[in-house]
Amino acid sequence: MTQATLLRPPHDSVGSPIPRSFDCVINLQVDGGKNRFMEKMFAGEYKTQHVLVFNAGESEMCREFEYHSTGLWFASYTEVTGAFTMDRFTPAAENVHVVSYPYIWLQDQLIRHGSNKEQFTHSVFQEIFSVGAPRVLFTYMMRQPKPHRRMMWDLLEKENLVNEFCTNAEKGICLDLKDNKMKDSDVLDNTVYADGVQHQSHRFPPWYFDCLIDFIPETHTSQMFFTEKTWRAFLGMRVPIIIGAQNCMKSLTAIGFQFPSYIKWDEWDNKQHEYDRIKGAISVLKELRQEQVADLWRLSSPERKHNFQLAISIAGKYHPPFQGEGFEDYTHIYDFAKGIADHAKENLDFS
């Protein structure tokens, strides 16, 4: 049995902590993935076991995974999810406990931009602090095709807003990532973006600091889930306009993030359907097209600096929800991110 300590309070959770120890601890990022895990689950291999699954890089196990009946396959089932809100997991079975750890992608971004292998570095952040006003209003980067991302592109085209820094991998409109390969009609091959160290698409693209706004097509529109796309904008000191779940911008303000008034997020972020949220955001971009980007840059300086500092603080603040044997991978990510955050606080001038 693996002893575990649940740190309190987690960001959010559903169900009650069940065992103090686990027969099986599974990290889906390194232990063969969710397909192998579900094969073993349906084969009945976990029926007498207390199982803890780390799935913080995703917002759910999969679309078909039913948390109200999952308990049938386990003595108890505990999952660490990357979801920001817990509505996806209710109602849960009595022996199911789901804990939210929504900052793994923020910590991942901090490590990618704030380290050189195992060494802390703040050179990228120093560069971000020193860049001048951008030239172009926004960038839009679409890789994996999804309906809401296609909506965003279609409306950008309709309003003649597509600019030199708008990319659409599905249509072959790429700037720095030239080797797009479709695995099938709806999925791009991610492996061609890896350089052996990290996915190229998780870095700041070369044109990023020549744009003020990052028009972000998040992964889900029905679940609150923030990936590297959102956190990259804060660490890159851009102004994010995020198309994700309903009220995703509001949820970020609830934990302290701030947005310049000119993006009018409170007028469209609460719309029930993603199409209406996209239309509202596109309307804002149309209005802002008439303004000087340098003026908008200057006006947003307080929010951009505040958000950078808050992102750094959050990345170093939130421990993985469990600690103990078997959790070393997640603990290492947190420890490394916290070290970078502390290094940045000591060496960067936030004034």
Image: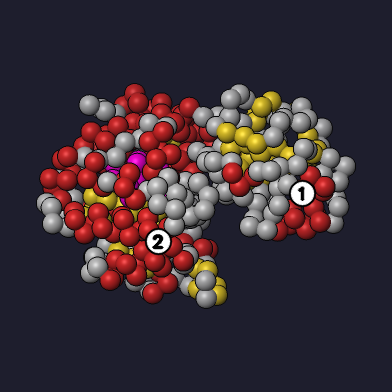
Q: Amino acid at mark 1?
A: Ser
Q: Amino acid at mark 2?
A: Tyr
Q: Which residue is mark 1?
A: 69
8 or 113, nearer to the observer: 8
189 or 221, nearer to the observer: 221
Q: Are marks 2 and 1 in contact (CB under 8 Å)?
A: no
Q: Is residue 74 above or below residue 44?
A: above
Mark 2 crowd level (few <14, some 14–19, many ≥20, 10 Å Cα): some
Q: Which residue is mark 2?
A: 275
Where residue 298 sits: x, y (%)? 15, 40
- Residue ID at (23%, 50%): 212
Where residue 279 sits: x, y (%)? 33, 60
Give the residues in magenta. Answer: 229-241
Where residue 217 sits: x, y (%)? 40, 57
Residue mark closest to the camera, 2 vs 1: 2
Mark 1 crowd level (few <14, some 14–19, many ≥20, 10 Å Cα): some
- The N terminus - image quarter: top right
The earlier-in-sequence mark between 2 and 1 is 1
Q: Secondary structure at mark 1?
A: loop
291 or 301, nearer to the observer: 291
- Residue ID at (34%, 31%): 309
Where residue 277 sits: x, y (%)? 37, 55
